[in-house]
Image (spheres, rainbow, N blue to C red):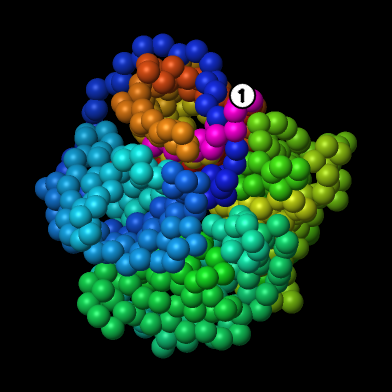
């Protein structure tokens, strides 16, 4: 679950402004099948966001949970601003998991410091996390590792990656996204690939010719899956989750970025005829026009196998100004192309023109026929995120009912002063099969700026998901938080499948987006 995104939190001038009234909503009692025993084993994790000075911060690492509430070992790499990278040993820690999958996780490090995280489990093997010690505003996730695959030869094949963060190429740090595919030979060599970069200037496709990767020669390689990699002139630290997934952090003087790489399947489309069906994508980042601002988009379209796009629906929040477009008289030249010049890379482009938004361009890389990463390459936009094929429509309250964990992130904006204020949310909700008042849950979230930070804990939620037509495009989700938050959040909800929903806040006071995923205890 990649998340809405780093550049949403990048150096945006904001201030606190509530979205509406709330009430004293009592959180539901924690019921379910999760417990401390649900978090047992070795997990790879990654997080990113901004620190209290507004500088980019990211970390990746590995920790060991004993199933009884203790963290017994761990290691992390940390990048903060342009000050370089640190490798930190986790000396211990603790955690508690409620029956509904919510929990508190605390890492202690060898320097005497610590990291407090509120988490929500999606299953015994993965979860989402938000930093709640108010020392920085970061969010991310963790997933169960396979230590038997902590080796160079386990990394063999084509890996699709999506990195985001900041570039140090100019005098002022700029938001940066990089998507691409890189080939690893299982012997420590990078033998090919291609990537596209966007830091306000779009570069790509850039051919990757050579590079290398290796496990740490110390115990950190065999114990935690840590290694280093270089390609396209950049240096990275990585942690192996398993042979199909790697967590990666850029650690050089040109940029600081973080993201995942996933093993590409052999059956990816190699021409337009192989790319068919309905897809949903969510991107977050920055708009660079005028003084700039945060931007997020969520959309759905159908590819016809012949380079044409139909049934396009897109919602955008650009620095508090929202827009909804759907295919009709206002959209023209909607098309896609699977890149045959870089055959086998999974690279493709997507474009359309709207009478209000202008020319909108994307590049994407397919992990499989049903999963991709996507980067907005439109003029004055830097944004990226996940794309997945849509399945299970028509969607109804009945086939969507269940227990979900969610992670939203973004910023809150106002008009009185210009103070950066980043927001990160983690929580759970139950969606009932009824058509009204069908959502109840609880969340924790932080609001952090240069003039102060606040943690809101155990905030009860009520709300409603309203399905529009067959549910395949923009549905309405309204969530009201209880005291002391007393805030109402209005979202559009694009359902990917009965287990996954992308959401985008349509309030003029916040640019927040995220993903809700059904829990499977």
Q: Quadrant of residue 228?
A: bottom left
Q: Number of callouts in the render?
A: 1
Residue nearest the observer in this picture, 238 or 151 = 238
Q: Quadrant of residue 226?
A: bottom left
Q: Is residue 335 visible?
A: yes
- Residue at the image position 69 percent from the left and 64 percent from the top: 348
Residue nearest the observer in this picture, 474 or 287 = 287
Farthest left residue?
A: 68
Residue nearest the observer in this picture, 303 or 519 = 519
Magenta stretch holds residue 3 = no
Few, some or many residues within 10 Å of mark 1 (<14, 14–19, 20+): few
Above or below — where is 173 with respect to 214?
above
**In the rendering, at what x and y percent does residue 505 appear?**
58, 31
- Residue at the image position 59 percent from the left and 64 percent from the top: 168
Magenta stretch holds residue 423 = yes
Q: Which residue position is annotated with label 1?
A: 416
**In the rendering, at what x and y percent does residue 147 appear?**
25, 70
Q: Quadrant of residue 162?
A: bottom right
Above or below — where is 15 with respect to 55?
above
Quarter in which the C terminus is drawn = top left
Magenta residues, start to end: 411-426
- Residue at the image position 25 percent from the left and 50 percent from the top: 114
**Dot 1: element:** loop
Horizontal relation, residue 338 to residue 7: left or right: right
**In the rendering, at what x and y percent does residue 501 appear?**
51, 39
Q: Is residue 41 visible?
A: no
Above or below — where is 207 with respect to 383?
below
- Residue at the image position 66 percent from the left and 79 percent from the top: 207
**In the rendering, at what x and y percent does residue 342 appear?**
69, 76
């Amino acid at each position: 679950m990649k998340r809405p995104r780093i550049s949403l939190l990048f150096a945006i001038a904001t201030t606190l402004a509530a979205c509406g009234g709330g009430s004293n909503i009592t959180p539901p009692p924690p019921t379910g099948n999760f417990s401390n025993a649900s978090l047992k084993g070795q997990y790879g994790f990654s997080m990113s966001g901004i620190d209290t000075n507004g500088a980019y911060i990211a970390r990746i690492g590995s920790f060991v949970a004993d199933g009884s509430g203790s963290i017994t070992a761990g290691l992390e790499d940390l990048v903060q601003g342009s000050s370089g990278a640190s490798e930190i040993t986790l000396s211990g820690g603790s955690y508690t998991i409620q029956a509904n999958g919510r929990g508190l996780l605390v890492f202690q490090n060898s320097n005497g410091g610590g990291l407090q995280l509120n988490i929500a489990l999606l299953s015994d093997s993965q979860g989402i996390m938000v930093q709640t010690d108010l020392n920085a505003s970061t969010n991310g996730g963790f997933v169960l590792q396979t230590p038997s695959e902590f080796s160079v030869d386990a990394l063999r094949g084509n890996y699709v990656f999506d990195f985001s963060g900041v570039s140090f190429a100019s005098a002022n740090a700029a938001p940066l996204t990089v998507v691409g595919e890189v080939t690893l030979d299982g012997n420590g060599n990078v033998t090919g690939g291609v990537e596209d970069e966007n830091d306000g200037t779009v570069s790509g496709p850039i051919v990757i010719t050579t590079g290398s990767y290796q496990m740490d020669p110390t115990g950190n390689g065999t114990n935690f899956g840590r290694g280093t990699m270089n390609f396209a002139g950049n240096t990275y630290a990585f942690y192996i989750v398993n042979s199909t997934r790697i967590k990666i952090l850029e650690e050089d003087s040109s940029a600081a970025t973080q993201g995942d790489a996933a093993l590409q399947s052999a059956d990816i489309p190699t021409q337009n005829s192989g790319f068919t069906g309905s897809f949903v994508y969510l991107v977050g980042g920055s708009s660079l026009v005028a003084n700039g601002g945060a931007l997020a988009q969520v959309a759905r379209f159908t590819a016809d196998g012949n380079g044409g796009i139909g049934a396009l629906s897109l919602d955008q929040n650009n620095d508090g100004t929202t827009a909804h477009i759907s295919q009709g008289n206002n959209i023209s030249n909607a098309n896609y192309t699977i890149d045959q010049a870089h055959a086998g890379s999974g690279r493709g482009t997507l474009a359309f023109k709207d009478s209000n938004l202008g020319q909108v361009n994307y590049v994407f890389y397919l992990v499989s026929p049903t999963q991709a990463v996507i980067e907005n390459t439109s003029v004055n936009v830097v944004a990226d995120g996940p794309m997945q094929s849509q399945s299970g429509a028509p969607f109804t309250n009945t086939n969507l009912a269940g227990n979900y964990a969610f992670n939203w992130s973004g910023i809150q904006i106002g008009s009185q002063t210009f103070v950066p204020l980043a927001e990160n949310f983690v929580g759970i909700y139950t969606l009932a099969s009824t058509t009204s008042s069908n959502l109840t849950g609880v969340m924790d979230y932080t609001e952090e700026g240069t003039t102060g930070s606040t943690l809101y804990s155990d905030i009860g939620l009520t709300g409603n998901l309203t399905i529009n037509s067959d549910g395949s495009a923009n549905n309405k989700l309204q969530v009201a938080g209880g005291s002391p938050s007393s805030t109402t959040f209005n979202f559009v909800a694009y359902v990917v499948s009965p287990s996954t929903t992308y959401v985008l806040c349509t309030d003029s006071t916040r640019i927040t987006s995220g993903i809700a995923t059904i829990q499977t205890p």
